[in-house]
Image (cartoon, rainbow, N blue to C red):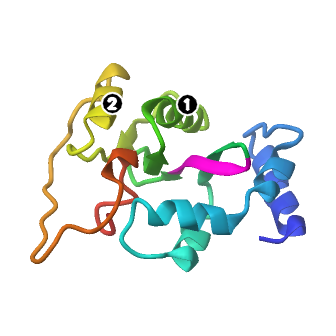
Amino acid sequence: MRRDELDFAVGLAANEGWNPGVHDADAFFATDPGSIARYDRLCFPALRRNFLDVWLNQPGSVALAWRENDRIRGYGAIRRCRDGWKVGPLFADNRLIAESLLLALNRTTTDEEPVYLDVPETNIEAMRLAADLGMHEVFGTARMYNRYQPDIVTERIFGVTTFELG
């Protein structure tokens, strides 16, 4: 996204009452999309830069990254759904970062609407985080493989992008 497009998007958010920070556009623009794609690749079995460019810029959605020492340590997005909001992906180096991102994403919604997070049971810390925040299971699914499990860092997956894509 070019800087003028980003400034326009932040302006739209302000006009809709989202109350973006004075320097939000600077922070968003400073985040290198390539570094997000590289971090994402640790948690998803294919490079999906083009997909992320669209997914993280959906109308009405919010995406945040945790950057430390010029390195992405986590990122997440929240988007409008037919019923409430859904967080996904939520990928982070550890629970503290995941929780900080999740709480920040939740603050971008209204209190009246539910927020959903699809948590993989293979990440015990992700399950504990959801439980500690008062979230409860709505339904369960299973991920199955016919040949091999992909080479990804499951400990960093606190919320899958979407059930349809993983």
Residue toward you, 80 or 125: 125
Residue toward you, 121 or 63: 121
In magenta, the rendered stretch is 70-78
Q: Is residue 141 above or below residue 69?
A: below
Point 13% across, 70% down: residue: 145
Magenta stretch secondary structure, dominant: strand
Residue toward you, 143 or 139: 143
Estimate the x, y position of residue 72 in percent, counting from the top left.
62, 51
Look at the numbered disc 1 and give the secondary structure of its residue: helix
Q: Is residue 56 visible?
A: no
Per the image, the residue denoted by label 2 is: 130
**Label placed on residue 23:** none
Given contact means CB atoms under 8 Å apart, are the residues at marks 2 and 1 in contact? no
Look at the numbered disc 2 and give the secondary structure of its residue: helix
Q: Amino acid at mark 2?
A: Ala
Estimate the x, y position of residue 27 in percent, counting from the top left.
80, 48
Considering the image in quadrants, where does the C terminus appear? bottom left
Q: Amino acid at mark 1?
A: Ser
Q: Is residue 6 above or below residue 10?
A: below
Point 88% across, 42% down: residue: 23
Point 55% across, 31% down: residue: 100
Considering the image in quadrants, where does the N terminus appear? bottom right
**Magenta-colored stretch includes residue 72:** yes
Per the image, the residue denoted by label 1 is: 100
Q: Is residue 65 left or right of residue 152?
A: right
Q: Earlier in the sequence, mark 2 or mark 1?
A: 1
